[in-house]
Amino acid sequence: MNAVKYVAHRGLSLHAPENTLPAFELAGREGFWGIECDTYCTTDGRWIVHHDRTVDRMTDGTGRTKSFTFEAIRSLNIVSGHGIASHPGTRIPTLEEVLAVCHSYGMHAFVEIEEYHCDADLEELVALVERCGMTGQTSFICFNADDLKKVRSLHRDIPLGYLSAKPPAPSDLELVEQLRPAFLDYDHRSTTLEDIRTCAAAGVDVSIWTVNDKEIARPFLEAGVAYITTDTILRE
């Protein structure tokens, strides 16, 4: 059984509100290898951390996430999520703030690229990670292969992860070859143990999401999965 790396999904999100600094701090205190977060670019070029296409579910505001200015989105309060009563006054964090938490705990960051406005925003995203001194502790993940190719053209060394909710396909391995260093990031519900073994035999790491049960995780561990993204604490 390989030494799997556990990634806290949107921070330790079954124990603190998702994609907030308390959730990422908690993951650090619990000794996670890494965290996963979701990023959008505001209309004025700031990268913030939030999951949904709108702010409606998690905040006291309404509207499409990418359509806010930075000042406007920072004025919203997080009003939903696990343990919200213990975290009054919590706001949507910047990516810089999240990376600072990762840096302080020595955690890796899986940064999912959600929505942005123009290619210059992607350039700023890569530059931001460099300014934060986190190029060695960051991977960009995305469902959009073209966005990953754009990032690779901007930086040759940052690991990239191709996200997919579909069953693994041979074209996925071809994409990884184009993007290296790169890995595949699959929904565990659409991934078989043989898929994991096939990728491992080809020298390709696989991450699976989102696993919150040790018994579900165990066979994937035995098959050689490299990363497991979880909302909770799975390690023995």
Image (cartoon, helix red, strand yellow):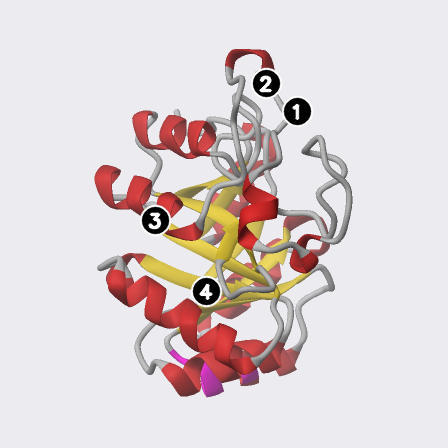
For badge 3, the amino acid type reads Leu
For badge 4, the amino acid type reads Phe
Q: How far apart are marks 3 and 4 (CA)?
A: 13 Å
User: Does dot 3 land on a helix, a strand or a loop?
Assistant: helix
Q: Note whether 93 is above or below 132 in the view shown.
A: above
Q: Residue furthest front?
A: 71
Residue 7 location (% of width, % of height): 44, 43
In the shown orientation, is residue 80 left or right of residue 225? right
Q: Nearer the viewer, residue 121 or 82?
A: 121
Disc 3 residue crowd, few under 14, some 14–19, many 20+, Cα 10 Å: many
Q: Is residue 177 magenta?
A: yes
Q: Residue at x 47, y 87 (%)?
A: 178
What residue would you read off at disc 3?
Answer: 99
What residue would you read off at disc 2?
Answer: 84
Q: Main secondary structure of the magenta part?
A: helix
What's drawn in magenta, residue-wise?
175-180
Q: Which residue is drawn at 74% across and 64% down?
A: 166
Of labels 4 and 1, the one closer to you: 1
For badge 1, the amino acid type reads Val
Residue 206 location (% of width, % of height): 49, 60
Q: Distance between the residues labelled 3 and 2?
A: 22 Å
In the shown orientation, is residue 141 left or right of residue 168? left
Asked if the residues shown at circle 1 and circle 2 are in contact, with their CB atoms under 8 angstroms apart, the answer is yes
Q: Can residue 226 be seen in this view?
A: no
Mark earlier in primary sequence (4, 1): 1
